[in-house]
Amino acid sequence: MEPERAVTAARTRVSLIADGLRRDIHEGRFRPGDRLPSEAELTRQHSVSRTVVREAVALLRSEGLVEARKGSGVFALNPADAQRRPFSDLDVERLSSVIELFELRSAFEIRAAALAAARRSAAQIEAIVAAHEAVAAVFDNNQSTRQADFEFHYAIAEASQNKRFPEFLSLIRPGIVPRVELEVGGGVPRTYVPNPDLIREHEKIVEAIFDADPDRAEQAMKLHLEGSLQRYRDMLRHNSERERQGSRL
């Protein structure tokens, strides 16, 4: 299987397992305090690797739906409490919320890129390259790059060797990969238009990490994220000006 297809397939399996467990928790099959099937059991049930199961569980942990107890397993939490977790009030279909998230991402993803360049393993370089190729594939097919782009940034976060970076990305994932396109004035979803420089910007990040150059990786990630942030700010400004002009009519 081609690298980008392998990454996409793995992420799809992660989503399917997480969706199933999430549904079981919300529907009461697993009540607060109930122990979920073990990692080994989930691996057998879904015919996947332990890594896929761990990532699915990590996603539910980031949503506040489960907690891991050392030596005991993973246990369901109250779904109602998850609604009160950080970022639960974000309206991820609005430009203003996306701008807030980009400002926050810049504060830690720039550092994550530098750490990835200094600490990455050979396997993690391969994962980053595969994720980059997956983004390029959907970009060339004029499809939404949001999911693949998240996987690219997640692979870099993992290569930082600091587990808090990927955990935090998982926590804000709904804002990075929204289910619908962002709304403009009047609540009308805008047409998805990818960053035309996305692939080249990613290439610079990959090259710096491959070359083990933390300063260059940090700078490349900074230019990438701040460029995206500026595009959203310009879009918000344009929408605000258009609304003001409409109110004068």
Image (spheres, rainbow, N blue to C red):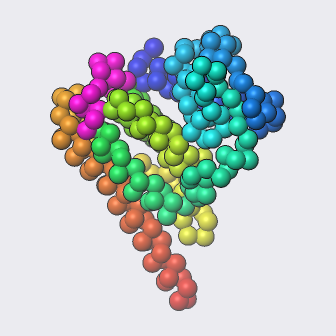
Residue lying at the far bottom in this picture: please name it. 248
- Residue 4, given in percent of the width and then of the height, sits at 42, 24
* Residue 115 sits inside the magenta stretch: yes
At a point 70% along the width and 24% down the height, the residue shown is: 36
Q: Tell me if residue 98 can be seen.
A: yes
How many numbered marks appear? 0
At a point 41% along the width and 38% down the height, the residue shown is: 165
Q: Where, by quadrant of the figure, is residue 218 drawn?
A: top left
Whether residue 28 sits left or right of residue 163 in the image: it is right
- Residue 78, given in percent of the width and then of the height, sits at 73, 41
Depth check: give the residue in front, 198 or 76: 76
Depth check: give the residue in front, 98 or 234: 98
- Residue 143, given in percent of the width and then of the height, sits at 49, 40
- Identify the image quadrant of the N terminus: top left
Residue 23, relative to residue 188: is it above or below?
A: above
Q: Which residues are magenta?
A: 114-129
- Identify the image quadrant of the C terminus: bottom right
At a point 76% along the width and 35% down the height, the residue shown is: 32
Whether residue 123 sits left or right of residue 209 in the image: it is right
Depth check: give the residue in front, 75 or 153: 75
At a point 65% along the width and 52% down the height, the residue shown is: 84
Q: Where, by quadrant of the figure, is residue 38 drawn?
A: top right
Residue 198, relative to residue 117: is it above or below?
A: below
Q: Tell me if residue 152 can be seen.
A: no
Residue lying at the far front in this picture: please name it. 71
Prevalent SS, magenta region: helix
- Residue 183, given in percent of the width and then of the height, sits at 56, 61
Residue 80, relative to residue 13: is it above or below?
A: below
